Amino acid sequence: MSHAAAHGHEHHAQEERKDPQLGKASIGKIAMWIFLVTDAMSFSGFLLAYAVLRSTTDWPEPAKYLGINLSGFATFILVCSSVSMVLAIDSCKHKDRKQMLNWLMATIIGGAIFLAIQVYEYQHLVHSGMTLSSFAHGNNLFASTFYIVTGFHGLHVLTGVIYLCCEYRFALRGDYDGGDYNRLEILGLFWHFVDLVWILVFTFIYLL
């Protein structure tokens, strides 16, 4: 087989591996946007329920019982991981495999630190009398809605970290060496969504 024919065959194989397009966006990216829109409705419902319930007269002041400083640090870590995700995609665009892997690992570590902080906070709150069904210092609904909203978000972070680990493995074996960053952009959409939702959750539950 001639060099030109081999090159043509390789180019054709690369084209086949690419996601099908719908306009300027890939099918995978459109599917992720649809998922995120529906997921945003779930979070909106939870936060709306929290807003309605906190109008009761015996609603406790979150600052007295929640670790705002620690959760603020966790928020900072999550925002930084969102930045490292952007840098990982940019490194892929420039076909810089080493930097791409480094930034993906930084994103994974950021997500893992956030989860560790959340587990630590849950342990502390349970020991202080705040469980899913009871609150030793006031309205039980405060504890229930807190754990449901933050736990639902934590599940998204865990899913994102697993997703990141899978893509890191694919990057390690060379899937993105050609500079095709579409799959990383899809992952980035999910991770940025998780980041944005947490900022809203932190503001609604911890600060207001």
Image: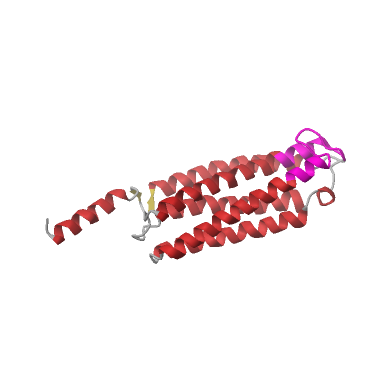
Asked whether, in this view, residue 57 is left or right of residue 29, the answer is right
Rendered location of residue 84, percent (x, y): 54, 61
Of residues 69 and 165, the one nearer the viewer is 165
Of residues 99 and 67, the one nearer the viewer is 99
Task: Say whether residue 137 is magenta.
Answer: yes
Residue reaching furthest top? 133
Determine the residue positioned at 68% across, 44% down. Answer: 150
Which quadrant of the view contains residue 156? top right
Rendered location of residue 122, percent (x, y): 74, 44
Asked whether, in this view, residue 12 is left or right of residue 142, the answer is left
Task: Say whether residue 59 is magenta.
Answer: no
In the rendered image of this protein, does residue 142 appear above or below residue 94? above
Quarter of the image for the N terminus: give it: bottom left
Determine the residue positioned at 78% across, 45% down. Answer: 124
Determine the residue positioned at 63% across, 53% down. Answer: 113
In the rendered image of this protein, does residue 96 appear above or below residue 35? below
Of residues 127 and 148, the one nearer the viewer is 127
Which quadrant of the view contains residue 148? top right
Rendered location of residue 110, percent (x, y): 60, 56
Magenta residues span: 122-147
Rendered location of residue 59, percent (x, y): 84, 42
Asked whether, in this view, residue 190 is left or right of residue 151, the answer is left
In the rendered image of this protein, does residue 144 appear above or below residue 26? above
